[in-house]
Protein backbone atom coordinates (compact mmCIF):
# COMPACT_ATOMS: atom_id res chain seq x y z
CA UNK A 1 0.00 0.00 0.00
CA UNK A 2 1.59 3.34 -1.01
CA UNK A 3 2.28 5.99 1.60
CA UNK A 4 -0.18 8.82 1.02
CA UNK A 5 -0.06 12.26 2.56
CA UNK A 6 -3.06 13.42 4.57
CA UNK A 7 -4.59 16.90 4.44
CA UNK A 8 -2.20 17.76 7.29
CA UNK A 9 0.81 16.92 5.11
CA UNK A 10 1.73 13.79 7.09
CA UNK A 11 2.10 10.20 5.83
CA UNK A 12 -0.06 7.31 7.02
CA UNK A 13 2.60 4.67 7.66
CA UNK A 14 1.71 3.17 11.08
CA UNK A 15 -0.02 -0.21 11.02
CA UNK A 16 -1.32 -2.57 13.70
CA UNK A 17 2.14 -3.87 14.81
CA UNK A 18 3.54 -0.34 15.08
CA UNK A 19 0.56 0.97 17.05
CA UNK A 20 0.47 -2.08 19.35
CA UNK A 21 4.19 -1.88 20.15
CA UNK A 22 3.90 1.88 20.74
CA UNK A 23 1.09 1.26 23.24
CA UNK A 24 3.08 -1.50 24.99
CA UNK A 25 6.18 0.71 25.09
CA UNK A 26 4.30 3.65 26.60
CA UNK A 27 2.44 1.49 29.11
CA UNK A 28 5.21 -0.78 30.42
CA UNK A 29 7.70 1.60 32.00
CA UNK A 30 10.10 1.72 34.91
CA UNK A 31 7.27 1.20 37.39
CA UNK A 32 6.94 -2.49 36.53
CA UNK A 33 10.35 -3.18 38.11
CA UNK A 34 8.92 -2.30 41.56
CA UNK A 35 5.18 -2.86 41.00
CA UNK A 36 5.00 -6.55 42.03
CA UNK A 37 6.30 -5.73 45.53
CA UNK A 38 3.96 -2.76 46.01
CA UNK A 39 0.90 -4.81 45.06
CA UNK A 40 1.98 -7.95 46.93
CA UNK A 41 2.74 -6.15 50.20
CA UNK A 42 -0.66 -4.41 50.11
CA UNK A 43 -2.87 -7.26 48.82
CA UNK A 44 -0.89 -10.44 49.51
CA UNK A 45 -2.24 -13.32 47.40
CA UNK A 46 -5.28 -11.21 46.49
CA UNK A 47 -2.96 -9.23 44.15
CA UNK A 48 -4.03 -11.22 41.09
CA UNK A 49 -7.63 -10.10 41.57
CA UNK A 50 -6.39 -6.52 41.85
CA UNK A 51 -4.83 -6.79 38.38
CA UNK A 52 -8.01 -8.32 36.95
CA UNK A 53 -10.19 -5.62 38.52
CA UNK A 54 -7.93 -2.89 37.18
CA UNK A 55 -7.82 -4.64 33.80
CA UNK A 56 -11.62 -4.46 33.55
CA UNK A 57 -11.54 -0.73 34.36
CA UNK A 58 -8.86 -0.05 31.75
CA UNK A 59 -10.67 -2.23 29.18
CA UNK A 60 -13.73 0.01 29.50
CA UNK A 61 -11.60 3.12 28.92
CA UNK A 62 -9.68 1.51 26.04
CA UNK A 63 -12.92 0.52 24.30
CA UNK A 64 -14.07 4.14 24.42
CA UNK A 65 -10.75 5.21 22.87
CA UNK A 66 -11.06 2.46 20.26
CA UNK A 67 -14.49 3.73 19.20
CA UNK A 68 -13.69 7.43 19.02
CA UNK A 69 -10.19 6.77 17.64
CA UNK A 70 -11.63 4.86 14.68
CA UNK A 71 -13.93 7.81 14.01
CA UNK A 72 -11.66 10.86 14.45
CA UNK A 73 -8.56 10.23 12.34
CA UNK A 74 -6.69 13.57 12.43
CA UNK A 75 -3.51 14.08 14.48
CA UNK A 76 -3.74 14.83 18.19
CA UNK A 77 -5.36 11.77 19.76
CA UNK A 78 -7.20 12.81 22.94
CA UNK A 79 -7.03 16.49 21.97
CA UNK A 80 -8.53 15.83 18.54
CA UNK A 81 -11.35 13.74 20.05
CA UNK A 82 -12.29 16.33 22.67
CA UNK A 83 -12.00 19.22 20.22
CA UNK A 84 -14.31 17.45 17.76
CA UNK A 85 -16.94 16.89 20.44
CA UNK A 86 -16.76 19.98 22.64
CA UNK A 87 -14.97 22.66 20.63
CA UNK A 88 -11.71 24.61 20.71
CA UNK A 89 -11.81 25.75 24.34
CA UNK A 90 -12.14 22.22 25.78
CA UNK A 91 -9.57 20.94 23.29
CA UNK A 92 -7.12 23.67 24.33
CA UNK A 93 -7.36 22.64 28.01
CA UNK A 94 -6.89 18.94 27.20
CA UNK A 95 -3.93 19.71 24.94
CA UNK A 96 -2.12 21.59 27.70
CA UNK A 97 -3.01 18.99 30.33
CA UNK A 98 -1.61 16.28 28.07
CA UNK A 99 1.55 17.75 26.61
CA UNK A 100 2.68 19.69 29.70
CA UNK A 101 0.79 18.45 32.76
CA UNK A 102 1.32 14.79 31.83
CA UNK A 103 3.87 14.55 29.01
CA UNK A 104 6.80 16.87 29.70
CA UNK A 105 6.82 16.48 33.48
CA UNK A 106 6.57 12.69 33.27
CA UNK A 107 9.31 12.49 30.62
CA UNK A 108 11.61 14.75 32.65
CA UNK A 109 11.15 12.46 35.66
CA UNK A 110 11.60 9.28 33.62
CA UNK A 111 14.82 10.35 31.91
CA UNK A 112 16.27 11.17 35.32
CA UNK A 113 15.60 7.54 36.28
CA UNK A 114 17.82 6.54 33.34
CA UNK A 115 20.71 8.49 34.88
CA UNK A 116 19.91 7.20 38.39
CA UNK A 117 19.98 3.59 37.13
CA UNK A 118 23.30 4.09 35.37
CA UNK A 119 24.74 5.85 38.44
CA UNK A 120 24.40 2.64 40.45
CA UNK A 121 26.90 0.99 38.08
CA UNK A 122 28.82 4.12 37.02
CA UNK A 123 28.92 6.72 39.86
CA UNK A 124 30.06 9.42 37.43
CA UNK A 125 26.41 9.83 36.40
CA UNK A 126 25.69 11.41 39.79
CA UNK A 127 27.43 14.56 38.52
CA UNK A 128 25.01 17.26 37.33
CA UNK A 129 27.22 18.11 34.33
CA UNK A 130 27.55 14.48 33.24
CA UNK A 131 23.80 13.96 33.62
CA UNK A 132 23.15 17.11 31.58
CA UNK A 133 25.45 15.89 28.80
CA UNK A 134 23.74 12.47 28.85
CA UNK A 135 20.29 14.06 28.58
CA UNK A 136 21.44 16.31 25.74
CA UNK A 137 22.84 13.36 23.76
CA UNK A 138 19.86 11.06 24.38
CA UNK A 139 17.18 13.66 23.68
CA UNK A 140 19.11 15.05 20.70
CA UNK A 141 19.39 11.57 19.22
CA UNK A 142 15.66 10.91 19.68
CA UNK A 143 14.76 14.29 18.16
CA UNK A 144 16.86 13.58 15.04
CA UNK A 145 15.38 10.08 14.66
CA UNK A 146 11.84 11.42 14.79
CA UNK A 147 12.47 14.39 12.49
CA UNK A 148 13.73 11.98 9.82
CA UNK A 149 10.28 10.43 9.65
CA UNK A 150 7.59 8.65 11.64
CA UNK A 151 8.73 5.40 10.01
CA UNK A 152 12.18 5.78 11.58
CA UNK A 153 10.65 6.74 14.92
CA UNK A 154 8.28 3.78 14.91
CA UNK A 155 11.09 1.38 13.90
CA UNK A 156 13.23 2.64 16.77
CA UNK A 157 10.34 2.29 19.25
CA UNK A 158 9.70 -1.26 18.01
CA UNK A 159 13.35 -2.14 18.62
CA UNK A 160 13.45 -0.57 22.09
CA UNK A 161 10.14 -2.24 23.05
CA UNK A 162 11.43 -5.68 22.10
CA UNK A 163 14.70 -5.06 23.98
CA UNK A 164 12.87 -3.96 27.14
CA UNK A 165 10.48 -6.92 27.00
CA UNK A 166 13.20 -9.59 26.61
CA UNK A 167 14.37 -9.61 30.28
CA UNK A 168 10.76 -9.49 31.51
CA UNK A 169 9.77 -12.44 29.35
CA UNK A 170 12.95 -14.27 30.45
CA UNK A 171 11.95 -13.85 34.11
CA UNK A 172 8.52 -15.30 33.34
CA UNK A 173 9.88 -18.28 31.39
CA UNK A 174 12.84 -19.23 33.59
CA UNK A 175 11.22 -18.32 36.90
CA UNK A 176 7.98 -20.23 36.46
CA UNK A 177 9.47 -23.53 37.62
CA UNK A 178 10.65 -21.93 40.91
CA UNK A 179 7.18 -20.76 41.98
CA UNK A 180 5.97 -21.98 45.37
CA UNK A 181 2.17 -22.20 45.33
CA UNK A 182 2.01 -21.47 49.07
CA UNK A 183 3.31 -17.95 48.39
CA UNK A 184 0.24 -17.13 46.31
CA UNK A 185 -2.46 -17.68 48.95
CA UNK A 186 -4.09 -15.02 51.14
CA UNK A 187 -5.25 -15.31 54.72
CA UNK A 188 -7.77 -12.46 54.74
CA UNK A 189 -9.31 -9.97 52.34
CA UNK A 190 -7.75 -6.47 52.19
CA UNK A 191 -9.71 -3.53 53.56
CA UNK A 192 -11.68 -1.42 51.08
CA UNK A 193 -9.33 1.53 51.66
CA UNK A 194 -6.20 -0.58 51.06
CA UNK A 195 -7.70 -2.14 47.95
CA UNK A 196 -8.69 1.29 46.58
CA UNK A 197 -5.24 2.82 47.14
CA UNK A 198 -3.55 -0.16 45.49
CA UNK A 199 -5.91 -0.05 42.50
CA UNK A 200 -4.95 3.63 42.07
CA UNK A 201 -1.27 2.62 41.82
CA UNK A 202 -2.13 -0.23 39.44
CA UNK A 203 -4.29 2.05 37.32
CA UNK A 204 -1.38 4.33 36.53
CA UNK A 205 0.75 1.30 35.68
CA UNK A 206 -1.78 0.60 32.91
CA UNK A 207 -1.93 4.23 31.72
CA UNK A 208 0.03 5.36 28.67
CA UNK A 209 -1.84 3.69 25.81
CA UNK A 210 -3.59 6.97 24.96
CA UNK A 211 -0.29 8.65 24.04
CA UNK A 212 0.18 6.24 21.11
CA UNK A 213 -2.99 7.67 19.53
CA UNK A 214 -1.48 11.15 19.21
CA UNK A 215 -0.16 10.00 15.81
CA UNK A 216 -3.72 9.27 14.64
CA UNK A 217 -3.01 11.37 11.53
CA UNK A 218 -0.27 8.90 10.54
CA UNK A 219 -2.12 5.61 11.20
CA UNK A 220 -3.00 3.47 8.18
CA UNK A 221 -6.68 2.52 7.93
CA UNK A 222 -7.51 3.89 11.42
CA UNK A 223 -11.01 2.37 11.41
CA UNK A 224 -9.37 -1.06 11.65
CA UNK A 225 -5.90 -0.31 13.04
CA UNK A 226 -6.95 1.69 16.13
CA UNK A 227 -9.38 -0.85 17.67
CA UNK A 228 -7.20 -3.84 16.77
CA UNK A 229 -3.98 -2.18 17.97
CA UNK A 230 -5.56 -1.22 21.31
CA UNK A 231 -7.06 -4.69 21.80
CA UNK A 232 -3.82 -6.58 21.09
CA UNK A 233 -1.67 -4.28 23.23
CA UNK A 234 -4.16 -4.20 26.12
CA UNK A 235 -4.36 -7.98 26.34
CA UNK A 236 -0.56 -8.40 26.10
CA UNK A 237 0.10 -5.80 28.82
CA UNK A 238 -2.39 -7.44 31.21
CA UNK A 239 -0.92 -10.91 30.58
CA UNK A 240 2.67 -9.69 31.11
CA UNK A 241 1.73 -7.86 34.34
CA UNK A 242 -0.18 -10.86 35.69
CA UNK A 243 2.58 -13.37 34.91
CA UNK A 244 5.29 -11.13 36.39
CA UNK A 245 3.23 -10.75 39.58
CA UNK A 246 2.66 -14.52 39.85
CA UNK A 247 6.33 -15.38 39.23
CA UNK A 248 7.74 -12.67 41.50
CA UNK A 249 5.35 -13.30 44.36
CA UNK A 250 5.55 -17.06 43.90
CA UNK A 251 9.35 -17.02 44.20
CA UNK A 252 9.92 -14.32 46.83
CA UNK A 253 6.87 -14.81 49.07
CA UNK A 254 7.41 -13.25 52.52
CA UNK A 255 10.82 -11.93 51.39
CA UNK A 256 9.09 -9.36 49.17
CA UNK A 257 9.28 -6.68 51.89
CA UNK A 258 13.08 -6.94 52.03
CA UNK A 259 13.46 -6.30 48.28
CA UNK A 260 10.50 -3.95 47.78
CA UNK A 261 12.56 -1.42 45.77
CA UNK A 262 13.66 -3.96 43.15
CA UNK A 263 11.73 -7.25 43.34
CA UNK A 264 12.37 -8.22 39.70
CA UNK A 265 16.11 -7.74 40.19
CA UNK A 266 15.91 -10.02 43.24
CA UNK A 267 14.16 -12.69 41.18
CA UNK A 268 16.75 -12.36 38.42
CA UNK A 269 19.53 -12.84 40.99
CA UNK A 270 17.86 -16.03 42.24
CA UNK A 271 17.60 -17.35 38.69
CA UNK A 272 21.06 -16.52 37.24
CA UNK A 273 23.07 -15.01 40.11
CA UNK A 274 24.40 -11.46 40.82
CA UNK A 275 24.67 -10.61 37.13
CA UNK A 276 20.86 -10.86 36.99
CA UNK A 277 20.49 -7.76 39.16
CA UNK A 278 22.77 -5.76 36.85
CA UNK A 279 20.85 -6.93 33.78
CA UNK A 280 17.55 -5.81 35.34
CA UNK A 281 19.08 -2.46 36.30
CA UNK A 282 20.12 -1.88 32.70
CA UNK A 283 16.71 -3.10 31.56
CA UNK A 284 15.07 -0.46 33.78
CA UNK A 285 17.23 2.24 32.14
CA UNK A 286 16.34 0.94 28.65
CA UNK A 287 12.66 0.83 29.62
CA UNK A 288 12.74 4.48 30.71
CA UNK A 289 14.61 5.48 27.56
CA UNK A 290 11.98 3.63 25.52
CA UNK A 291 9.16 5.56 27.23
CA UNK A 292 10.73 8.93 26.45
CA UNK A 293 11.58 7.95 22.87
CA UNK A 294 7.97 6.88 22.38
CA UNK A 295 6.71 10.19 23.75
CA UNK A 296 9.04 12.13 21.45
CA UNK A 297 7.43 10.35 18.52
CA UNK A 298 3.88 10.78 19.77
CA UNK A 299 3.34 13.90 21.89
CA UNK A 300 4.68 16.54 19.43
CA UNK A 301 1.65 15.65 17.29
CA UNK A 302 -0.48 17.31 19.98
CA UNK A 303 1.42 20.57 19.46
CA UNK A 304 1.18 20.11 15.69
CA UNK A 305 -2.58 19.50 15.81
CA UNK A 306 -3.12 22.46 18.14
CA UNK A 307 -1.11 24.73 15.84
CA UNK A 308 -3.19 23.56 12.85
CA UNK A 309 -6.32 24.62 14.73
CA UNK A 310 -4.88 28.00 15.67
CA UNK A 311 -4.46 27.43 19.41
CA UNK A 312 -0.64 27.28 19.27
CA UNK A 313 1.91 29.32 17.25
CA UNK A 314 1.89 28.58 13.51
CA UNK A 315 5.55 27.59 13.67
CA UNK A 316 4.54 24.30 15.31
CA UNK A 317 2.33 23.36 12.34
CA UNK A 318 5.22 23.35 9.86
CA UNK A 319 5.89 20.01 8.16
CA UNK A 320 9.38 19.11 6.91
CA UNK A 321 9.40 19.30 3.11
CA UNK A 322 11.45 16.10 2.78
CA UNK A 323 10.57 13.93 5.80
CA UNK A 324 6.89 14.97 6.17
CA UNK A 325 7.19 15.34 9.96
CA UNK A 326 6.19 18.24 12.28
CA UNK A 327 9.85 19.03 12.92
CA UNK A 328 9.45 22.25 14.90
CA UNK A 329 6.94 20.59 17.24
CA UNK A 330 9.44 17.75 17.80
CA UNK A 331 12.33 20.17 18.42
CA UNK A 332 10.34 22.33 20.87
CA UNK A 333 8.99 19.33 22.78
CA UNK A 334 12.45 17.75 23.06
CA UNK A 335 13.92 21.06 24.23
CA UNK A 336 11.30 21.40 26.97
CA UNK A 337 12.02 17.87 28.23
CA UNK A 338 15.73 18.73 28.36
CA UNK A 339 15.15 21.99 30.26
CA UNK A 340 12.95 20.36 32.91
CA UNK A 341 15.14 17.26 33.18
CA UNK A 342 18.21 19.30 34.22
CA UNK A 343 16.34 21.91 36.28
CA UNK A 344 14.67 19.49 38.69
CA UNK A 345 11.59 21.74 38.63
CA UNK A 346 9.45 18.83 37.45
CA UNK A 347 9.64 17.27 40.93
CA UNK A 348 7.42 19.99 42.37
CA UNK A 349 5.06 19.98 39.38
CA UNK A 350 4.83 16.23 38.81
CA UNK A 351 1.83 15.98 41.14
CA UNK A 352 -0.17 17.30 38.18
CA UNK A 353 0.33 14.10 36.21
CA UNK A 354 -2.09 11.86 38.12
CA UNK A 355 -5.06 14.22 38.03
CA UNK A 356 -4.27 15.34 34.48
CA UNK A 357 -4.53 11.89 32.91
CA UNK A 358 -7.75 11.08 34.80
CA UNK A 359 -9.37 14.30 33.57
CA UNK A 360 -8.21 13.52 30.02
CA UNK A 361 -9.71 10.02 30.20
CA UNK A 362 -13.00 11.33 31.59
CA UNK A 363 -13.32 14.02 28.90
CA UNK A 364 -12.55 11.59 26.06
CA UNK A 365 -15.18 9.15 27.35
CA UNK A 366 -17.76 11.95 27.47
CA UNK A 367 -16.70 12.94 23.94
CA UNK A 368 -17.27 9.33 22.81
CA UNK A 369 -20.79 9.39 24.25
CA UNK A 370 -21.59 12.73 22.62
CA UNK A 371 -20.29 11.77 19.17
CA UNK A 372 -22.39 8.59 19.26
CA UNK A 373 -25.44 10.79 18.71
CA UNK A 374 -23.98 11.96 15.38
CA UNK A 375 -25.01 9.56 12.66
CA UNK A 376 -22.36 8.25 10.25
CA UNK A 377 -22.87 7.42 6.59
CA UNK A 378 -23.24 3.65 6.10
CA UNK A 379 -20.13 3.61 3.88
CA UNK A 380 -18.06 5.15 6.68
CA UNK A 381 -19.17 2.95 9.58
CA UNK A 382 -16.45 2.66 12.23
CA UNK A 383 -15.87 0.49 15.30
CA UNK A 384 -18.70 0.69 17.84
CA UNK A 385 -18.35 -0.97 21.23
CA UNK A 386 -21.15 -3.31 22.30
CA UNK A 387 -23.53 -2.80 25.21
CA UNK A 388 -24.77 0.70 24.46
CA UNK A 389 -23.76 3.09 27.26
CA UNK A 390 -22.86 0.33 29.73
CA UNK A 391 -19.11 0.37 29.03
CA UNK A 392 -18.76 4.19 29.03
CA UNK A 393 -20.71 4.27 32.31
CA UNK A 394 -18.34 1.71 33.88
CA UNK A 395 -15.38 3.82 32.74
CA UNK A 396 -16.89 7.06 34.11
CA UNK A 397 -17.66 5.49 37.52
CA UNK A 398 -14.11 4.08 37.71
CA UNK A 399 -12.49 7.43 36.93
CA UNK A 400 -14.69 9.41 39.32
CA UNK A 401 -13.82 6.87 42.04
CA UNK A 402 -10.10 7.29 41.33
CA UNK A 403 -10.41 11.09 41.30
CA UNK A 404 -11.80 10.94 44.85
CA UNK A 405 -8.63 9.05 45.87
CA UNK A 406 -6.30 11.90 44.84
CA UNK A 407 -4.67 14.09 47.47
CA UNK A 408 -5.77 17.67 48.03
CA UNK A 409 -2.43 18.84 46.61
CA UNK A 410 -3.00 16.93 43.37
CA UNK A 411 -6.52 18.30 43.04
CA UNK A 412 -5.52 21.85 44.06
CA UNK A 413 -2.53 22.06 41.72
CA UNK A 414 -4.64 20.77 38.83
CA UNK A 415 -7.37 23.37 39.44
CA UNK A 416 -4.75 26.14 39.50
CA UNK A 417 -3.12 24.79 36.34
CA UNK A 418 -6.46 24.67 34.49
CA UNK A 419 -7.24 28.22 35.65
CA UNK A 420 -3.92 29.43 34.22
CA UNK A 421 -4.64 27.61 30.95
CA UNK A 422 -8.03 29.34 30.74
CA UNK A 423 -6.39 32.75 31.19
CA UNK A 424 -3.85 31.93 28.47
CA UNK A 425 -6.65 30.83 26.14
CA UNK A 426 -8.71 34.02 26.53
CA UNK A 427 -5.60 36.21 26.12
CA UNK A 428 -4.76 34.34 22.91
CA UNK A 429 -8.33 34.67 21.65
CA UNK A 430 -8.30 38.41 22.33
CA UNK A 431 -4.97 38.74 20.53
CA UNK A 432 -6.22 36.66 17.59
CA UNK A 433 -9.40 38.77 17.33
CA UNK A 434 -7.34 41.97 17.37
CA UNK A 435 -4.99 40.57 14.71
CA UNK A 436 -7.93 39.62 12.50
CA UNK A 437 -9.35 43.14 12.79
CA UNK A 438 -5.97 44.61 11.80
CA UNK A 439 -5.76 42.22 8.86
CA UNK A 440 -9.22 43.32 7.70
CA UNK A 441 -8.22 46.99 7.99
CA UNK A 442 -5.07 46.32 5.93
CA UNK A 443 -7.15 44.60 3.23
CA UNK A 444 -9.58 47.55 3.10
CA UNK A 445 -6.68 50.04 2.84
CA UNK A 446 -5.12 48.02 0.00
CA UNK A 447 -8.45 47.87 -1.86
CA UNK A 448 -8.98 51.61 -1.46
CA UNK A 449 -5.44 52.36 -2.69
CA UNK A 450 -6.06 50.33 -5.84
Image (cartoon, helix red, strand yellow):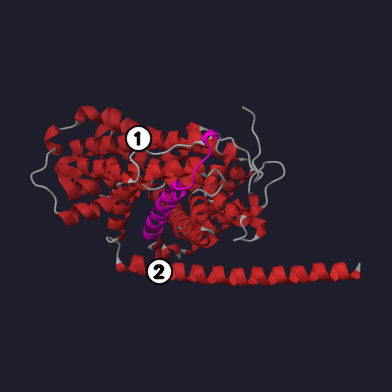
Residue that numbered label 2 is attached to: 415
Residue 306 % position (x, y)? 58, 56
Residue that numbered label 1 is attached to: 235
Q: In front here: 122 or 358?
A: 358
Give the crowd class for mark 1: few <14, some 14-19, many >=20 residues within 10 Å. Answer: few
Tell whether 390 sits left or right of 196: right
Q: Does 220 appear in magenta?
A: no
Give the crowd class for mark 2: few <14, some 14-19, many >=20 residues within 10 Å. Answer: some
Residue 154 % position (x, y)? 54, 38
Where residue 426 sits, quadrant-wise, is bottom right
Q: In front here: 61 or 238?
A: 61
Q: Which residue shows up at 69% across the image and 46% down it? A: 320
> Which range is magenta?
354-379
Mark sitting on residue 122: none
Q: Which residue shows up at 51% across the image and 41% down it? A: 376
Residue 208 % position (x, y)? 41, 47
Quadrant where the C terminus sits is: bottom right
Query: Visible in this render: residue 290?
Result: no
Magenta highlight: main SS: helix
Q: Which residue shows up at 66% across the image and 44% down it? A: 7
Residue 105 % position (x, y)? 45, 59
Q: In front here: 242 or 392?
A: 392
Pick out the residue farthest to the right: 450
- Secondary structure at badge 1 equals helix
Q: Which residue shows up at 58% across the image and 72% down it? A: 427
Do the residues under discs 2 and 1 have CB atoms within 8 angstroms?
no
Q: Does 372 appear in magenta?
A: yes
Tell whether 393 sits left or right of 189: right
Tell whether 334 sits left or right of 353: right
Kindly report the distance in space between the C-alpha atoms of the residues bearing marks 2 and 1.
34 Å
Amino acid sequence: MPQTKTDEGLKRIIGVPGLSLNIINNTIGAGIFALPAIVSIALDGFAIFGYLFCGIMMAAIMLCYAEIGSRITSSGGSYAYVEAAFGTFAGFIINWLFFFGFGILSDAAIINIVADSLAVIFPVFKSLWVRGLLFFILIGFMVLINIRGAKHGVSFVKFITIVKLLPLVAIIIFGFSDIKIGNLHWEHLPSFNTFGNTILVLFFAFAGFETALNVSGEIKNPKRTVPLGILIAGVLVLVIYLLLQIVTQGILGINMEAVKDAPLAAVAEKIIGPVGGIILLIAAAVSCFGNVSGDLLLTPRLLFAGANHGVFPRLLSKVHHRFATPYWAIIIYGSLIFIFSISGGFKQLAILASAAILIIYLTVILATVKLRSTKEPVAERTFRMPGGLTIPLIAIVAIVWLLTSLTKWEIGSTIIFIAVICVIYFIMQKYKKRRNILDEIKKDVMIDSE
